[in-house]
Amino acid sequence: MYVVGTLKAAATFLRITRQNISTGLAIAGVIVLAKSIKLTAKFTNALEIPPEFIDKNVKLRGQLRRITEQGLEIEHVPITLPIISSLQKRWHSNGLLLVRLAGVELTSDGIIWLKEEMKPSQMIWFQLLGRKESALDCFVIVNKGRFFSICLNEEILRRGLGKTVRIEGLDHESRIYWKLHKRLLQAEMKAVKKKKGIWKEETFIEKLKEHMSNYKFIQKLKQFATWLRIRL
């Protein structure tokens, strides 16, 4: 009986050992695969992002850290795999991605609006469209509640806080370029029709003040010219 019990215990031990080895190999395989295709990589610099990510216009997520005149500084938040989440933290380094609103020329009022509208550490999605040196040109998506989101590129134009420009990084004859550019133009036209922001027309009083200011300037020039003639 003792021998039988010992054999059963040994068999159980071997079975558990094989299972642990299989699990370990599976986890190792997931780690190697994830690292090889950059699924779980944390990008801290625009140059670290694989070219195929930009070519395929992959969407990444991140937390907003700062807003500057150069663009949005975002900390990339990679995909987390539950099995290896503790190991992922060891791979990650610190650094921020500089993200620009593709196809949009921001005004100073646009930057102010972004700073007022966006919350610190707010989670956002950014679709990669192009890369120039250390900056990424993207369409930036912000969730507004569970079922609603806005594209910052379009929202800026819709409010008249910027102008539509060419989308850098995309082939200007490609289908995706014209699809996205059309969206931007439509957003801009809404601001033009409603005379918002930079498209707002001057009121009669504002125009009158400008004319009066110009008139005073001309009068001063005439007075200066008269003074010169007398002196000479």
Image (cartoon, rainbow, N blue to C red):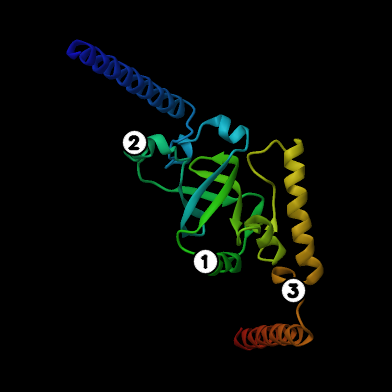
Q: Position of residue 6 (x, y in %)?
A: 20, 14
- Provide the residue designation for mark 1: 115
The residue carrying pointer 2 sits among few (fewer than 14), some (14 to 19) or many (20 or more) residues within 10 Å by Cα, namely: few
Q: Is residue 70 visible?
A: no
Q: Nearer the viewer, mark 2 or mark 3?
A: 2
Secondary element type, mark 1: helix
Q: Nearer the viewer, mark 1 or mark 3?
A: 1
- Provide the residue designation for mark 3: 200
Residue in the picture at 40% in, 28% down = 31
3D distance between C-alphas at marks 1 and 3: 22 Å
Q: Nearer the viewer, residue 14 or 60?
A: 14
Residue in the picture at 73% in, 84% down = 206
Secondary element type, mark 3: loop
Q: Nearer the viewer, mark 2 or mark 1?
A: 2
- Provide the residue designation for mark 2: 87
Q: Is residue 72 visible?
A: yes
